[in-house]
Image (cartoon, helix red, strand yellow):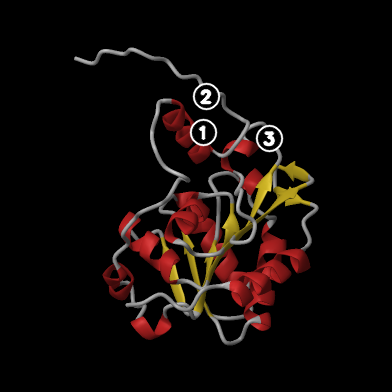
Amino acid sequence: PWLHTRIVEQPFHRMPMYRQRWQMLKDLGLQGSAPEFRVEIAATARRAAGIDAADDGRYLHLSANATDDRRDLPITQQVALWNALHARFPTHRIAVSADATARGRSKLQALLQQIEFVPWRVFDGTLDIAGFASVVQGAAAHVGPDSGGLHIARVAGTRSVSWFRQNHHLPNWFPDDPERHQAFIAPESRADGLHGLDNETLIDAVARALASRAPACGA
């Protein structure tokens, strides 16, 4: 049985969730200078997905969807963004993915039917967690909405560009390291998606991420 001798309160909505947990442990006496993500992600998982060692750090990973349309860009804007990324960064291949839900796969198919290029790799919900994490880790940058891909990018050390809607949960999940993870808050969220974000702003952020990234990860 547990014997609780001390209670520590750490309020929500004031800082990112991982820092809330870290501060709680610090208040309990844990030693350490800063929170760290020490996670080992096997490169073999992306090798099995068709990404060779020579491809590491040479592709963009684009996420097709979040769990709610109100957290996504409108599909017409997302199509334009994907086309623009493909044109702006011709030396980087494009890998795209969606989650395994019917909604996620439907969104990805709609995007694939409208974009003007054929992505290098397409993962329509076929990756398990290990495979998805490995694919994100191998990318030069991750681009997508507030979703699991962004959180994996942060743990994996992959630079990212993401977009969020304004809500009271925002401080819990909004990235607090803008040098590596550039995130943008949309002025308006409607039923069909986020409005008020300019694609050029997002594309310029991707350019900064690519210019500042570390050398390609090893095999």
Q: Quadrant of residue 6?
A: top left
Q: Is residue 29 above or below residue 86?
A: above
Secondary element type, mark 1: helix
Residue 9 horizontal side relative to residue 143, left or right: left
Q: Which residue is mark 3?
A: 167
Q: Which residue is mark 2?
A: 10
Distance from disc 2 to disc 1, alpha carbons, whole Å, reads 6 Å
Q: Can residue 71 be seen from the camera position used here?
A: yes
Residue 191 horizontal side relative to residue 160, left or right: right
Residue 44 horizontal side relative to residue 123, left or right: left
Q: Which residue is mark 1?
A: 20
Residue at left offset 47%, top offset 77%? 57
Secondary element type, mark 3: loop
Amino acid found under the numbered disc labelled 3: Asn
Residue at left offset 48%, top offset 50%? 148
Amino acid found under the numbered disc labelled 1: Gln
Of marks 1 and 3, the one in the foreground: 1
Q: Position of residue 31 (x, y in %)?
A: 39, 37
Residue at left offset 48%, top offset 78%? 215
Q: Can residue 126 be seen from the camera position used here?
A: no
